[in-house]
């Protein structure tokens, strides 16, 4: 895929895919423009997608345009604050400790960094944050795998859409029940805070709370799994960085930022043109679906020198791993805190972890760049 993206950046930076009727953008500057110019590139799918598909996104922040987007994001940010996220760090380290107790008990000296740690951690964190019962965890844990388990390379593949829809229906129903429960019986959790949040007399409807809770899980689970898995993989491929991290001479932060660029967990986002728009030699007509390839922008040699190299402390421009503009990832802080906590505990609990690089398994679905299995050997 990376070689294909490079070819497209060079030869067809705005490309119409006849097989599914979508446009694609590949260059860093074009992507920045699409993410910033929300009048021309909107996020509301109801313009261009069939109603049964667009309906899923209704009322979900990521699919709403200004001015409604700003109001909704303001309300949610009011309770999902950086301070709340920072305060979670010790608890998150506790969760990592618990998961590692099991993984490191393995007498063969191996565990699956994704299956045993990175896949479950974000669900436990989001579940606790929302105040969902631990007994429902198995259901929440399996949702992401169901979203991405169908192997294919077309996001509009019928089988994929069907399997995704049935999982989404289940998840929607589950979260709606919970939102209604918390309205009746408030507790000390994010779901209750969302139910009570009020700005200028406006409150979130049950459906909006449901959509936000579902968005937390769908946007915050597999992406964080990917970030942690991709980080440990990058450490394995870059022994100097691994050694510096072990010695404490390199912080996790710059490592994580370079992983977000070099191995972007979230590979593409979608926009819909509101009017004809010129990109290079091409004109994208109005009402078209545009695939905005973050992963390609992050590898654009026009923006990043030697983009294929994993290099700490790059200074030539921001990566697009969390997007850009008004829809910039609301969970970026949480994803960073979770990944940092996991790295900190891994450093404390092991003397050595070594990814088994010839046994990697990746999800084979569009949209994510995520390991499904990352075996590591370890010494305690
Ligand atoms: C939006 C990536 C983790 C919640 C986004 C967007 C990207 C992204 C690229 C922009 C979407 C767009 O422009 O259409 C990631 C990555 C993550 C991650 C790579 C992990 C490494 C999380 C977490 C949460 C979260 C942990 C919450 C628990 C959201 C929400 C939005 C969003 C609510 C929508 C914001 C808006 O529309 O204003 N994320 N995300 N994400 N993300 Fe994340």
Image (spheres, rainbow, N blue to C red):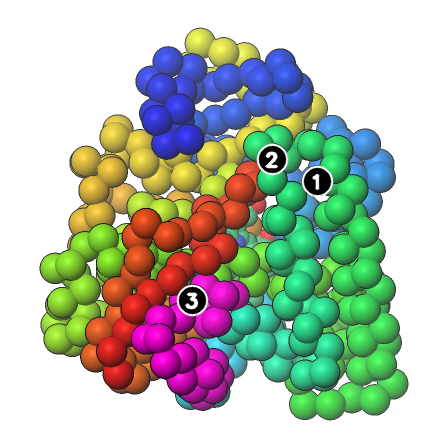
Residue found at the far top of this picture: 281
Where is residue 160 shown, x and y percent of the image? 70, 40
Name the element at disc 2. loop
> Residue 177, located in which quarter of the rendered image?
bottom right
Residue found at the far front of this picture: 108
- Residue 152 is tagged as 2
Q: Circle 3: is it few (<14), some (14-19), or many (20+) Cα within 10 Å?
A: many
Q: Nearer the viewer, residue 103 or 65?
A: 103
Q: Nearer the viewer, residue 182 or 175?
A: 175
Which residue is pictured at 84% across the width and 64% down the height? 173
Asked if disc 1 is less than 8 Å from ligand 1, the answer is no
Asked if disc 2 is less than 8 Å from ligand 1, the answer is no
Residue marked by disc 3: 112
Where is residue 219 shown, x and y percent of the image? 59, 57
In the rendered image, which quarter contains the N terminus?
A: top left
Residue marked by disc 1: 160
Q: Is residue 135 visible?
A: yes
Q: Considering only order in the chain, which callout, 1 or 2, is on the residue closer to the N terminus?
A: 2
Where is residue 215 shown, x and y percent of the image? 66, 59
Q: Which residues are magenta?
A: 94-119
Q: Is the C-beta separation of discs 2 and 3 under 8 Å?
A: no
In the rendered image, which quarter contains the C terminus?
A: bottom left
Name the element at disc 3. strand
Which residue is pictured at 62% across the width and 49% down the height? 149
The span from disc 2 to disc 3 (Cα, nearest Å) is 24 Å
Which residue is pictured at 26% across the width and 70% down the height? 353
Where is residue 251 shown, x and y percent of the image? 21, 70
The span from disc 2 to disc 1 (Cα, nearest Å) is 8 Å
Q: Nearer the viewer, residue 57 or 347?
A: 347
């Amino acid at each position: 895929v990376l070689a294909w993206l490079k070819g497209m950046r060079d030869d067809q930076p705005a490309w119409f895919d006849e097989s599914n009727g979508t446009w694609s953008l590949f260059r860093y500057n074009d992507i920045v423009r699409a993410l910033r110019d929300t009048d021309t590139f909107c996020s509301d799918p109801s313009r261009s997608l069939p109603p049964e598909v667009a309906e899923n996104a209704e009322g979900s922040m990521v699919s709403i345009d200004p001015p409604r987007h700003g109001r909704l994001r303001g309300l949610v940010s009011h309770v999902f604050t950086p301070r709340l996220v920072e305060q979670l760090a010790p608890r998150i380290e506790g969760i990592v400790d618990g998961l590692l107790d099991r993984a490191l008990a393995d007498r063969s000296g191996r565990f699956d960094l994704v299956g045993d740690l990175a896949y479950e951690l974000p669900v436990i964190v989001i579940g606790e944050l929302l105040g969902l019962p631990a007994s429902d965890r198995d259901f929440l844990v399996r949702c992401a795998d169901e979203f991405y388990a169908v192997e294919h390379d077309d996001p509009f593949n019928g089988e994929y859409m069907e399997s995704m829809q049935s999982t989404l229906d289940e998840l929607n129903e589950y979260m709606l029940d919970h939102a209604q429960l918390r309205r009746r019986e408030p507790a000390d959790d994010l779901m209750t805070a969302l139910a009570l949040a009020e700005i200028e007399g406006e409150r979130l409807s049950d459906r909006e709370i449901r959509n936000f809770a579902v968005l937390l899980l769908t946007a915050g689970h597999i992406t964080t799994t990917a970030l942690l898995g991709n980080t440990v993989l990058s450490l394995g491929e870059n022994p100097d960085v691994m050694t510096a991290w072990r010695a404490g001479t390199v912080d996790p932060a710059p490592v994580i930022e370079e992983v977000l660029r070099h191995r972007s967990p979230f590979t593409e986002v979608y926009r819909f043109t509101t009017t004809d728009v010129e990109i290079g030699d091409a004109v994208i007509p109005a009402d078209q679906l545009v695939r905005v390839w973050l992963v390609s922008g992050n590898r654009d040699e026009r923006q990043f020198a030697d983009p294929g190299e994993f290099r700490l402390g790059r200074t030539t421009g921001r990566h697009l791993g969390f997007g850009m503009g008004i829809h910039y990832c609301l969970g970026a802080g949480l994803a960073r805190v979770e990944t940092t906590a996991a790295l900190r505990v891994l450093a404390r609990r092991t003397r050595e972890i070594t990814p088994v690089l010839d046994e990697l398994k990746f999800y084979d679905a569009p949209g994510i760049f995520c390991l499904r299995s990352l075996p590591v050997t370890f010494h305690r």
